[in-house]
Amino acid sequence: MRVYIPATVPMLRDLVGNRELAPVGGTAFAVTPALREAYASGDDEELGEVAMNEAARASLRLLAAEREAIGSEDSDDEAAPAAGGNPVYRRAVIAADVTGAKLRPDLDDAVVRLAGPIGYQQIASVHVDLADAEPQVAKAVDVVDAADLGDTDAEFVLGDAEDHQLAWYAAQELPFLLELL
């Protein structure tokens, strides 16, 4: 099954360094029967885009958590800079081929739970925002939860970030991409 795993740049660095990645909470997104049923039309490629967009939105939540963790490090010792510095405001999604994913329609139509970490060899591609998306992504991180709760102003801010297409990278290009960031 092709799954789309939300990530951040530090998570991608861990993936390259450790040659595997345990998705946060084992959560990924995929073209599931519930997702197919939710859309009146659309082929596998179009539904795959929907699942990837859901993973990209989840990446915003990971960025929010990363920023909060950096902020708490700063408040613990204001004289010392945060170990990771500022977050890199780029959404990241890892497309991987896995077996044993469990459907989680109780969470959302496209959500699946992975059985364990994914290995580097399972990666089909990696998708990351380009630099020009960073200002909109930073703003979207602030409002993603409000947008999910129906705040129309927040939805517009989120839409500005989601208007940026994620760039496609082959797994073997990932180390070089991370060197450039």
Image (cartoon, rainbow, N blue to C red):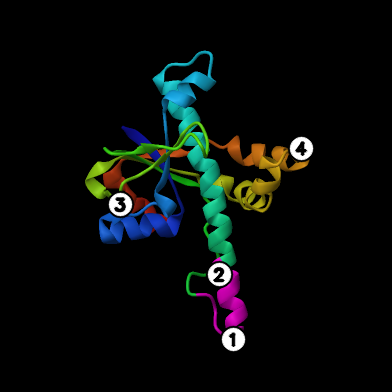
Q: Quadrant of the N terminus?
A: top left
Quick check: can you spot residue 157? no
Give the number of the mark in front: 3 or 2: 3
Q: Is residue 110 or residue 69 the one in the foreground?
A: 110
Q: Nearer the viewer, mark 2 or mark 1?
A: 2
Look at mark 2 in the image and give the residue it sits on.
70
- The reply to whether callout 3 and callout 2 are in contact (CB within 8 Å) is no
Query: Whole-Å distance between the Cαs marked 1 and 3?
Result: 36 Å
Q: Secondary structure at mark 3?
A: loop
- Identify the residue at horizontal 52%, vertical 35% (top origin): 108
Looking at the picture, which amino acid does disc 2 mark?
Ile
Residue at image mark 3: 117
Span shown in magenta: 69-82
Q: Earlier in the sequence, mark 1 or mark 3?
A: 1
- Tell me which amino acid carries mark 4: Thr
Q: Earlier in the sequence, mark 4 or mark 3?
A: 3
Residue 114 rendering spot, x and y as whole percentages: 35, 44
Q: Amino acid at mark 1?
A: Ala
Tag count: 4
Say few, some or many: other residues with alpha carbon within 10 Å of mark 3 (under 14 / 14 to 19 / 20 or more).
few
The percent position of residue 154, horizontal first and vertical second, equals 73, 43
Mark 2 neighbour density, 10 Å: few (under 14) some (14–19) many (20 or more): some
Earlier in the chain: of badge 1 and badge 4, it is 1
The label on residue 30 is none
Q: In the displayed structure, would residue 147 be above or below residue 62?
A: above
Kindly identify which residue carries mark 4. Answer: 152
The vertical placement of 64 against 149, above or below, is below
- Percent across and percent down for residue 15 are 32, 55
User: Which quadrant holds the C terminus?
Assistant: bottom left
Q: What secondary structure is marked by label 4?
A: helix
- Name the disc covering residue 79, or none: 1
In the image, which is nearer the foreground, mark 4 or mark 3? Answer: 3
